Amino acid sequence: MFESRSETDASDWYSSIPARRQGRGSLSPALKRWYNLNEMTDDSAYIVVGDTTNRWRDNKLFIFDDTLLHESISQTDRARYCLFVDMIRRIPFPAVMRATVYVIRSLTESF
C-alpha cells in the first residue's frame, strides 16, 4: 500500500487511503504533514485530530502532532491520494527514546 519516494532524512510516502484509518504514534517524535493530492469537491473526506477536524476540500495541507489520537475518514467511492511527510522533531533524551523503541520492537517482533 505504501511506496517510498524519499532519499532524505524525512520519510515521505504516497498512499491510497482506506475508507477509515485510525492511529497514534505515542513514541514517535514526529510532526505529520499530510497533503491531499487530488481535488475533493465535497466533505466526504477529512481527518480528525483531537478536537480539530480538517476537511480535505477546504485545506489540502494538514500538519499535526503524531502523539495525538487521529483518524482519517474517506466516505467516498473515489480513490484519494495523500502525501505523508514525517518531520522529526528534537527530543530531550534521544538515547532514552532509541532504547525504548528498541525494547518495544524486540518485544513485538514475534507478533
Image: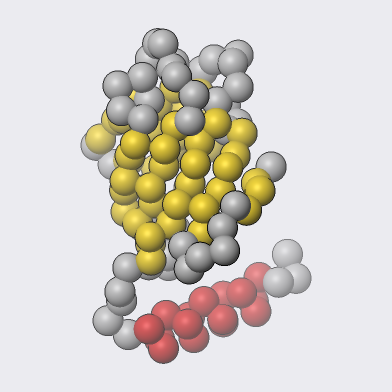
Residue 66 versus residue 51: which sits nearer the camera?
66
Whether residue 48 appears in this view of the structure is no
Left or right of residue 68: residue 25: right
Where is residue 48? Give x, y as percent: 35, 34
Q: Residue at x 73, y 64 (%)?
A: 111
Up-down: is 39 above or below 11?
A: above
Number of dots carrying numbers: 0
Spot the residue most to the right.
110
Q: Residue at x 32, y 68 (%)?
A: 89
Residue 4, compared with residue 43, is above or below; it is below
Q: Is residue 8 depicted above or below 2 in this figure?
A: below
- Which residue is rendered at x = 31% and y = 46% of the image? 63
Instruction: Name the colouring of the figure.
Output: secondary structure
Residue at the front extreme of this rendering: 7
Q: Position of residue 84 (x, y in %)?
A: 48, 46
Q: Quadrant of the N terminus?
A: top right
**Residue 42 is at least partly visible in this image:** yes
Q: Farthest residue toward the left?
A: 51
Left or right, residue 15 beside residue 75: right
- Residue furthest to the bottom in view is 95
In this picture, is 100 found above or below 8? below
In this view, the residue in front, 44 or 4, is 4
Please tell me in which quadrant of the rendered image residue 87 appears.
bottom left
| Residue occupying image coordinates x 32% and y 54% | 65
Q: Position of residue 36 (x, y in %)?
A: 44, 32
Residue 19 image-quadrant placement: top right
